[in-house]
Amino acid sequence: MTEAGSYAELAQGWRALRPRGVLVREVACVGAPRTLLFAELGAGTATATISISAGVHGDEPAAPWALLALVRDGLLDGRFAYRIWPCLNPSGYVAGTRANAEGQDVNRSFSRGGTSPEARAVFTANRDRRFAFALDLHEDFEAAGCYVYEPLRPGFAPWYSPVVVAALDDAGLPVQALEDGFDVGAPAGFDPTTMYRLERGAVLVDYEAELRAFSGLPSSFALLYRGTPSSLTFETPLPRPWAERIAAHRVAVTAALSRL
Ligand SMILES: [Zn+2]
């Protein structure tokens, strides 16, 4: 594949994994005429569960296709179980828009039990669940290289981002320099220097400062808030070739899992 397929093709790709033991369901979005794909691997055998999601922004297509490829090609570490959201914003994916069909940024709707149909569906499915780790896959239309957001609780040093950046370098994939002035998406009205430390390929986030700044939480922060020890958000550069972006997600996810 050299470019994004349709949402129907993405869903078909996931259903095709059922004979291989991947549980694939469609979860209702109450109050909206759509469902979310949901997949589980390794439930019942592994001791720890990891959450992986993609496609919360509908105009970042390599992320959901890379996630499908990671599962199809058996690249997820078999020590763990996985709960996977293959495409958290299907109406945005179909329309090619960041927001969902109602114009909401789904990745700012994970507060107060969910303020979008998609977030409410996720909270309902995750009720009573605890995760050892979470990964959320994105693309950045302004970037020339890959980078990762690593939220840090007070007193913690970065643990995942150094190995992710090293793995990208080893694979010859572009890493974003993140020099001063790069827009890392600080909540409106907040000075990014108060909550982000920028390194090559990594945005180290002061978790508590950013949590106070967001009025609508991203899915990654909602998971941290609900007890997941760490949660990474990975970004590939949308202007780069498709194959490179798919490869970068594969490298980043496998590198991060190796560090668990
Ligand atoms: Zn995004």
Image (cartoon, grey):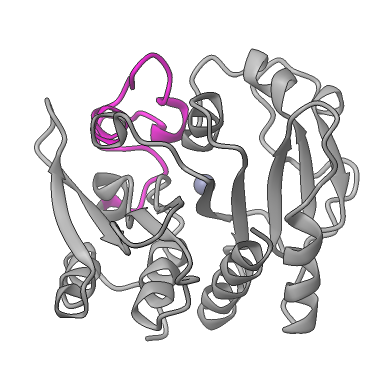
Q: Is residue 121 left or right of residue 67?
A: left
- Residue 5 is situated, as x and y percent measured from the top left of the image, at 29, 73
Q: Is residue 96 magenta?
A: yes
Residue at point 22%, 53% (across, down): 37
* Closer to us: 99 or 51: 51
Name the residue located 81 percent from the left edge and 60 percent from the top edge.
162
Quadrant where the N terminus sits is: bottom left
**Total marks in image:** 0
Place of residue 11 in the rendered image (x, y in percent of width and height, measured from the top left): 19, 65
Quadrant in which the C terminus appears? bottom right
Task: Decide: is 20 above or below 101.
Answer: below
Tell me residue 104's x, y (percent).
36, 28
State which region is magenta: 95-122
Q: Nearer the viewer, residue 155 or 145?
A: 155
> Residue 157 placed where, x, y %?
85, 42
> Which residue lies at the image location 59% right of the left edge and 19% below the top edge?
214
- In front of the other: 138 or 92: 138
Give the residue at x 89% y 50%: 179
Q: In the visual, does 30 lie left or right of 233?
A: left
Dominant secondary structure (helix, strand or loop) of the stretch shown in magenta: loop
Q: Quadrant of residue 119?
A: top left
Q: Is 123 above or below relative to 10?
A: above
Answer with the quarter of the image where residue 224 lies.
top right
In the rendered structure, does residue 101 fall within the stretch colored magenta? yes
